[in-house]
Amino acid sequence: MAAWLIPAVQAILPLVGRIVSATLPEFTTRKPDAPVQDPTGILQKQINELQMAASQNAVHVKELAEQLQKTVAAIEQAAEGAESRFRRTTRLLGVAVVLSVAALAVSVAALLLR
């Protein structure tokens, strides 16, 4: 599993439940077979619910933006760490290649000088 994926999942996972519960419909609906008693009252209630939902959405969007910012920072930090490990491994590889070529040269010289 990619090293950057774990911090990203850990940052997003706590919000999944709240996102799912926020997307469930919670609005007042008028049943089609029910008689219309106060259409303006139902309409006003629906408008109030929509306004509350819009303000809650704004709060949730802000929270998600903060979480996304933290996730991107964690991914960048993990990428920097991976890049430094890659550079160190590349240097070790270069040293290993030089030592193997030197060992090969010594063994060929030992065979020829025998």
Image (spheres, helix red, strand yellow):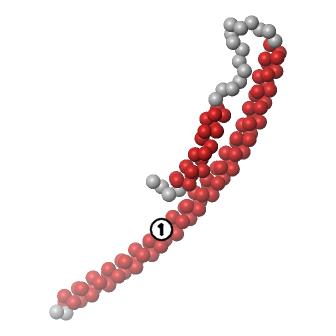
Counting from the top left corner in percent of width and height, residue 95 is at 40, 79
Is 98 in front, or is 44?
Answer: 44
Q: Residue at x 77, y 22 (%)?
A: 46
Query: Which image quadrant: the N terminus?
Result: bottom left
From the viewer's perspective, tell me whether residue 80 is left or right of residue 38.
left
Residue at figure coordinates x 74%, y 32% from the top left: 53
- Quarter of the figure with residue 74: bottom right
Q: Residue at x 45, y 75 (%)?
A: 91
Image coords of residue 44 (percent x, y): 82, 21
Q: Give residue 78's position: percent from left, percent from top.
A: 55, 61
**Which residue is more in the foreground, 96 or 75?**
75
| Quadrant the C terminus occupies | bottom left
Residue at x 52% of width, y 66% of height: 83
Percent coordinates x, y for residue 65 in the rendering: 68, 47
Q: Is residue 28 above or below residue 93?
A: above
Residue 113 lies left or right of residue 52; in this view the side is: left
Residue matched to label 1: 86
> Crowding near pointer 1: few (<14 within 10 Å), some, many (20+)?
few
Total marks in image? 1
73 versus 64 height, above or below: below
Q: Secondary structure at mark 1?
A: helix
- Amino acid tagged 1: Phe
Closer-to-camera residue (107/14): 14
